[in-house]
Image (tube, coloured by chain):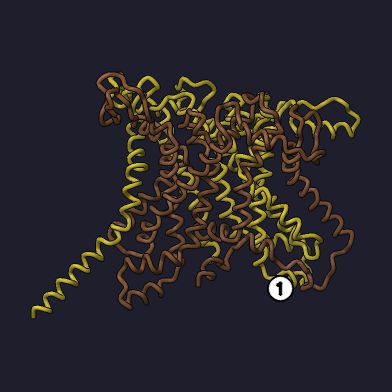
Chain colours: A yellow, B brown
């Protein structure tokens, strides 16, 4: 009798232990995150309703000069009421989306084509080419961005020197001096409705192309290997040309691998802080600014902390929207796969 | 067991990339010579595109000329180590040595990586293996910061850490703001915001949710049979975690650590925002200082040497661990 109750008690305590055990395992992470992630998140929302600036730094939230300005920061950001030159929210937002889409739109096809090229049976020196093509993936983007920044230097940069060599072949002996990163006049003035793209955008596209396609080639090569050879043999017996084979077999079978890679690339380009900051810093005149670089500028150089907090909240909702859309696309392709 | 977990058959890109069948013997046709030559030309053009900036920066770094390049050079004419030596002796105009910069970068990358990993692993285990009432809610809580770009929390972290300061009030009294402040103005001893510790905390704030999410994704793929067997043999949940799960997960923990290291090594935004003392600068910050319109005094051969030095550890880790890193990336399913 006594032993039975003792056993009952023990199982009870074991059960209790079982119930709280997961929370004990979660405790360290949640204590740390409460202090350094969740608390700052809440503080950020509170800050976004104030006019916190440099002069409040000393006393912080206790400063008597600090005002609750309601949603004025949000309205100022969206309507362009900030004391910041050359900043219009929707222009930056459209540019940012365009920047991410145009990058992916170039990287994915190039990556796939190069993967197909490298996959041609009987091509000589494949291993060497593969090792070389991997190099851009291995080099840190901050280094890539600084090197390309110098390549696009208007006076000493390798790009202008290269173009000088090329034009020299056509009989011109004038040195090329294109102001890649500082020329304000856009080469194609009608491209985006909210403001044309400066030359720096094209320079950054070139540099980011160098950085971006090898990853896509890597993904596409992996997917190409899983396409059974019989499919191509059957198709060629049936008389399909190689371009028919490409569009009818290769492209549809690459899609399941390339869609997630493209979405990954989109998210990455959308928030490509280091690369943009190192290459142009958003210039000239904020024309290559993306949301994250402007958010950083607000807190580091402009020091409008209240506005910066409001801007970060807006960026959060933009990121949430992007996530919901891309997540939907991924889901849709998954169900396409199952069907 | 571990090896099967480590190298999933699905999507192991780099491995496939290097080991795929290149003999081309399965199909009977030989590639005609003219096609081979056309393709070789195409492939070589791509090689030139890839090698252009790499050769450019290597050539610059081995040059002893401190003037800027006046014409395009893509092959080193000399193998001078002057630029490397100058960078190692005196990397910037600031009073800071290369060893200090290297140490700061290493302390930040390693420290943030290790702390995030150790704090995250037990939480990831709880999410992966236990069913409990608040599971969904807490997982969404971990996911919310992941949506935020890394810069998103910069403002509140900056202000909160800036308010934590240590003052020497004189007479041997030390005051820690915001909890205590000196009666009169004291001497500022320490500002959490302007320290590597503060930057590290800010970086952990971004890295921790990632680590939890990544490790959960990985732990989900470890079969539960071993743990069940151990439980039947009388092991309690803690023993299962420490004696079975942790050893099994060790390779992935290492991969997560190195992935984190690669990311933190390049971390620029937080240090650039927080740090003002040259002694606590990192290599990434120094590299930024060496380019652009404000770096007119810096010879480009020194910049090139610095770029190669900053790139070296990341490239070495990538090449040494390419197999594990790629499988880790695909398993975690989130950005690295």
Q: Where is residue B289 drawn, in percent x and y?
A: 59, 30
Residue A200 position by quadrant: top right
**Toward the viewer: A233 or B270?**
B270
Q: Residue at x 64, y 26 (%)?
A: B295
The answer to whether residue A277 is seen in the rendering is no
Find the residue positioned furthest to the front: B171
The residue located at (84%, 65%) in the rendering is: B31
Q: Which percent across, then down, holds residue A196?
A: 63, 29
Residue farthest toward the right in the current orientation of the protein: A171
Q: Residues within 10 Å of mark 1 (few under 14, many from 20)?
A: few
Element class at badge 1: helix
Residue A175 relative to residue B212: left or right: right
Farthest-out residue, left: A1
Residue at numbered disc 1: A230
Inspect this view and state whether residue B255 appears: yes
Where is B105 relative to A249, above or below? above
In the image, is A182 to the left or to the right of B24? Answer: left
Q: How many marks?
A: 1
Q: Is residue B309 above or below residue A10?
A: above
Report x, y in % for residue A29.
35, 51
């Amino acid at each position: 009798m006594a032993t039975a109750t003792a056993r009952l008690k023990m199982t009870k305590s074991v059960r209790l232990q079982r119930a709280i055990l997961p929370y004990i395992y979660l405790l360290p992470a949640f204590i740390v995150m409460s202090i350094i992630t969740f608390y700052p998140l809440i503080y950020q929302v509170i800050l976004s309703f104030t006019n916190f600036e440099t002069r409040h730094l000393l006393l912080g939230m206790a400063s008597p000069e600090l005002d609750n300005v309601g949603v004025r920061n949000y309205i100022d950001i969206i309507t362009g009421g900030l004391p910041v030159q050359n900043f219009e929210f929707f222009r930056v937002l459209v540019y940012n989306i365009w920047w991410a889409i145009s990058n992916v739109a170039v990287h994915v096809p190039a990556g796939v084509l190069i993967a197909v090229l490298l996959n041609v049976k009987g091509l000589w020196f494949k291993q060497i080419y593969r090792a070389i093509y991997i190099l851009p993936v291995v080099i840190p983007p901050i280094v890539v961005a600084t090197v390309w920044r110098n390549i696009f230097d208007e006076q000493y940069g390798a790009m202008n020197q290269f173009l000088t060599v090329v034009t020299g072949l056509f009989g011109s002996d004038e040195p090329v001096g294109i102001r890649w990163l500082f020329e304000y006049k856009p080469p194609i003035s009608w491209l985006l409705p909210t403001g044309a793209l400066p030359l720096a955008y094209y320079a950054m596209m070139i540099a980011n192309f160098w950085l971006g396609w090898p990853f896509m080639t890597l993904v596409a090569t992996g997917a190409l290997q899983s396409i059974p050879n019989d499919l191509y043999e059957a198709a060629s017996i049936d008389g399909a040309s190689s371009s028919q084979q490409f569009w009818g077999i290769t492209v549809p079978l690459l899609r399941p691998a390339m869609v997630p890679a493209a979405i990954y690339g989109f998210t990455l380009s959308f928030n490509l802080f280091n690369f943009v900051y190192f290459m142009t810093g958003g210039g000239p005149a904020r024309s290559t600014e993306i949301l994250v670089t402007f958010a950083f500028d607000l807190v580091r150089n402009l020091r409008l902390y209240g506005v910066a907090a409001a801007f970060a909240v807006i960026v959060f909702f933009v990121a949430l929207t992007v996530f919901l859309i891309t997540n939907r696309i991924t889901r849709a392709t998954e169900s396409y796969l199952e069907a | 067991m571990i090896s099967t977990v480590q190298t999933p058959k699905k999507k192991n890109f780099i491995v496939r990339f290097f080991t795929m069948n290149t003999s081309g013997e399965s199909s009977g046709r030989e590639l005609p010579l003219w096609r081979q030559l056309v393709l070789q030309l195409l492939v070589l053009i791509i090689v030139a595109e890839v090698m252009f900036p790499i050769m450019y920066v290597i050539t610059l770094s081995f040059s002893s000329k401190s003037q800027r390049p006046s014409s395009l050079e893509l092959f080193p004419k000399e193998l001078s180590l002057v630029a490397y030596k100058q960078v190692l002796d005196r990397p910037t105009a600031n009073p800071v040595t290369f060893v200090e910069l290297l140490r700061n970068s290493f302390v930040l990358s390693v420290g943030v990586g290790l702390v995030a990993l150790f704090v995250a692993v037990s939480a990831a285990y709880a999410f992966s293996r236990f069913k409990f009432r608040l599971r969904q809610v807490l997982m969404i809580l971990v996911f919310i910061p992941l949506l935020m770009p890394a810069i998103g929390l910069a403002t509140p972290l900056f202000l909160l850490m800036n308010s934590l300061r240590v003052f020497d009030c004189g007479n041997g009294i030390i005051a820690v703001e915001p909890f205590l402040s000196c009666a009169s103005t004291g001497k500022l001893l320490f500002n959490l915001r302007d320290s590597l510790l503060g930057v590290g905390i800010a970086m952990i704030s971004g890295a921790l949710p990632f680590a939890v999410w990544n490790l959960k994704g990985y732990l989900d793929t470890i079969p539960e049979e071993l743990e069940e067997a151990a439980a039947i043999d009388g092991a309690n949940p803690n023993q299962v975690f420490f004696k079975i799960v942790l050893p099994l997960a060790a390779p992935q923990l290492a991969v997560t650590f190195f992935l984190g290291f690669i990311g933190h090594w390049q971390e620029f935004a937080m240090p650039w925002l927080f740090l003002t003392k040259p002694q606590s600068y990192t290599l990434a910050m120094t590299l930024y200082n060496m380019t652009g319109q404000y770096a007119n005094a810096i010879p480009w051969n020194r910049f090139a040497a610095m770029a190669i030095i900053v790139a070296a550890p990341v490239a070495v880790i990538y090449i040494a661990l390419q197999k594990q890193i790629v499988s880790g990336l695909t398993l975690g399913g989130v950005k690295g």
